[in-house]
Image (cartoon, rainbow, N blue to C red):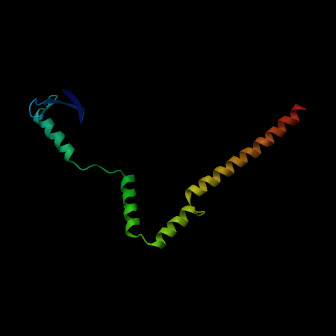
Amino acid sequence: VMVPVMAGEGETVVTEAAAGKASGESTAAAVVGGGGARGVDDLLDEMSRPEKLSTVAKTSADWDLFKSKNADAALKEQLESKARGNEAYLVKKDFLGRVDERRFELERRERDRERAKRGK
């Protein structure tokens, strides 16, 4: 069975797996387009590298670690109060959304009144 696998830098690695009939073993041989053993070595080197973390993932992990190390009641209470208080981003966003909607409704009523006056 031939299985194509993308290696990196535009190389395609084709893996051939043959299943053993009696023992149930399988053997694999890697064939790299034009690279030979160097391509396999590059693939193994790439696979052995540690996974890169994004800034968001790293920051999230650091924040979770900080919260777990400083897991006292005062910190939890402070974080919860900030999340619900007037300083919270989501609270402000919801408030501004409601204000915007109310202004739109008032302006629409005013436009409807103007249209009604013109129509008479």
Q: Residue at x 76, y 46 (%)?
A: 106
Relative to residue 63, is residue 13 drawn left or right?
Answer: left
Q: Where is residue 77 in the image (x, y as percent from the top left)?
A: 51, 69
Q: Position of residue 9 (x, y in %)?
A: 24, 35
Quadrant in which the N terminus is drawn? top left
Q: Which residue is drawn at 55% across and 66% down?
A: 81
Farthest front residue in view = 22
Q: In which quarter of the image is residue 30?
A: top left
Quadrant in which the C terminus is drawn? top right
Relative to residue 70, is residue 34 drawn left or right?
Answer: left
Q: Quadrant of residue 34?
A: top left
Farthest left residue in view = 22
**67, 100: nearer the viewer:** 67
Question: Can you say whether 111 is above or below 89 in the image?
Answer: above
Marker count (numbered): 0
Farthest right residue in view = 120
Q: Residue at x 21, y 44 (%)?
A: 47
Q: Where is residue 29 in the image (x, y as percent from the top left)?
A: 12, 32
Relative to residue 61, is residue 51 drawn left or right?
Answer: left
Q: Position of residue 27 (x, y in %)?
A: 11, 34
**41, 83: nearer the viewer:** 83
